[in-house]
Image (cartoon, rainbow, N blue to C red):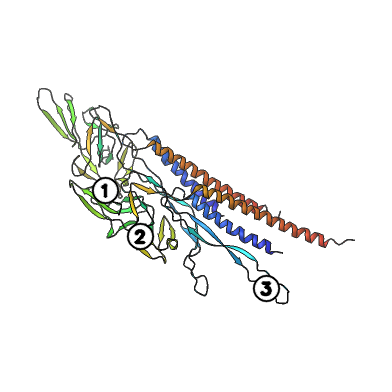
Amino acid sequence: MQNALLIGLSRQMTLERQMDVIANNVANVNTNGFKADHSLFEEYLNSNAHEDNFVGSDRRVSYVQDRGTYRDVGQGPMEATNNPLDMAINGNAFFAVQANGAERYTRDGKFALSSTGQLMTSDGNLVLGTGGPIVFQPTDHDINVAPDGTVTVLEGTAKTDSIRGKIRMVTFDDPAKLTKLGANLYSAGSANQQTDSKSTVQQGYVEKSNVNSVGEMSRMVEVMRSYTAIANLLQQQSDLHKSAIEKLADVPA
Amino acid sequence: MQALHTAATGMAAQELNVQVISNNIANLRTTGFKKQTAAFQDLIYEHVRRVGAQASDQGTILPVGVDIGGGVKTVGTPRSMTQGTLSQTGNDLDLAMSGEGFFKILMPDGTYQYTRDGTFQMDNQGRVVTAQGNPVQPTITIPNNASGITVNEQGQVTVTLPGSSSNTVLGQIGVTRFINKAGLQPVGSNQFTETTSSGAPQDGTANSEGYGKITQGSLEQANVDVVSEMSDLIAAQRAYEMNAKVISAADQMMQSTTALFR
């Protein structure tokens, strides 16, 4: 009798968490390099009571639980900024950055310079090149980033390019294993990293969030309606319960 | 319900975004103005089920975890220091910088400020000053009987004095650059001050060693692109509305729960 309430409740709890995931996607609809999350659900079968004396065995009660959130690693749209230090990756790779002494990964290519000329993220984390941080000289101008990530500049009065480093691009065999740390950073966790050769850097662009707002809005409506539908179901179940008690206890005089 | 707070961070972020965009649009016609863009980051995640955790005694590893994000924060409003277009004014003392560098201005308190706004005038002593009356560095004083003021691409100021057939060089307008010009702090009046993030100022000569060149009789316009600002504004407004929708949806969900079992 109470199972229907509990099953409904299990669904409501997962819907609430799905709503949280949607809310986070929508909140980050303008976050550079953000990758949307989606919820996954699975059936959770309750172990049944073992009673062999019945003709038919008990049916197991099927609950729902959220198994995971998977990440949509698809490419976000590119926005032209004309800023020579803004970079977007076309492909699956990530920028490698140095954050709190560890190597982290990001798709947010809104870079800046430090007072010592080092290339860094908006947060002040160093962007790593294939040979360490990328450092510019005070007289450098006309910064150019080639599709393969090679950073060249004209230094002072020089007429030929000087190389300042090469942006390190890293891919993962299973990007779903990357853990989101917030601040647009990912940690590798158990994912195996490889040096990427297929992705290209686009200078003067930033990758916007890949959140599909129409999809999120329709999912949100779906979640809300399912949630209220289950609330109604719980109400009906409760009413049924109540009326059963009232009717059965109503002993005719 | 987390979704309410998450959406609230989203609304706050978009509100700030609109503020930044409206300041860009307000300064559409401000000489030497450099536009800003708001940059956002996601907040930390609550790992309800951690990815890579062991799911069973048989050693099954979870391929994905349940990560619930807490919303968005503003990380900064970086300034885009790209070149603005030059517009001709024909004024002798209107100077535009194309390329790297800033004009150096001496403030009344003895400190220096830096600007890309080359709307200069002469004060009562003949000094070349900004619209606020602060002298451009190094100070150049133009005699009141001088005619034919010329500023060349290096910033050298020459005039013709009466009774002289040749030009007289009065001095050279300086140009200063910073390794991280986006790290300069705006102080209003189209001027910036040095910060620890911008690096130390490096004075130099215009049109040499990567320093920008000076164009006389022109002014640098704001680098604001109206069309992209308007589309950003619409995007920000829609994002704000979407977050508001999330709040009302979460509210309805909570309502349906509190209405249960009356």
Name the chain letter of the residue that bears numbered label 1.
Answer: A
Q: Is residue B35 left or right of residue B246?
A: left
Q: Is residue B125 left or right of residue A216?
A: left
Above or below, comparing residue A175 to residue B190 in the picture:
below
Query: Residue tagged by mark 2?
Result: A170
**Residue A116 visible in image:** no
Q: Secondary structure at mark 2?
A: strand
Residue at image position (62%, 64%) is: A63
Q: Nearer the viewer, residue B210 or A166?
A: A166
What amino acid is found at the position of numbered circle 1 in the picture? Ile
Image marks 3 and 1: residues in contact by CB distance under 8 Å: no
Q: Quadrant of residue B208?
A: top left
x then y, percent, for residue B237: 48, 41
Spatial CA distance of label 1 from label 2 is 22 Å
Circle 2 crowding by C-alpha within 10 Å: few under 14, some 14–19, many from 20: some
Query: Residue tagged by mark 1?
Result: A143
Among all residues in the image, which is located at the extreme top? B163
Among all residues in the image, which is located at the extreme right? A253
Q: Secondary structure at mark 3?
A: loop
Name the chain letter of the residue that bears numbered label 2.
Answer: A
Q: Is residue B249 left or right of residue B182?
A: right
Above or below, comparing residue B30 to residue A179 in the picture:
above
Above or below, comparing residue A173 to residue A159 in the picture:
below
Circle nearer the N terminus (2, 3): 3
Q: Nearer the viewer, residue A245 or A54?
A: A54
**Residue B102 visible in image:** yes
Query: Residue tagged by mark 3?
Result: A49
What amino acid is found at the position of numbered circle 2 in the picture? Val
Q: Quadrant of the N terminus of chain A?
A: bottom right
x then y, percent, for residue B32: 31, 36
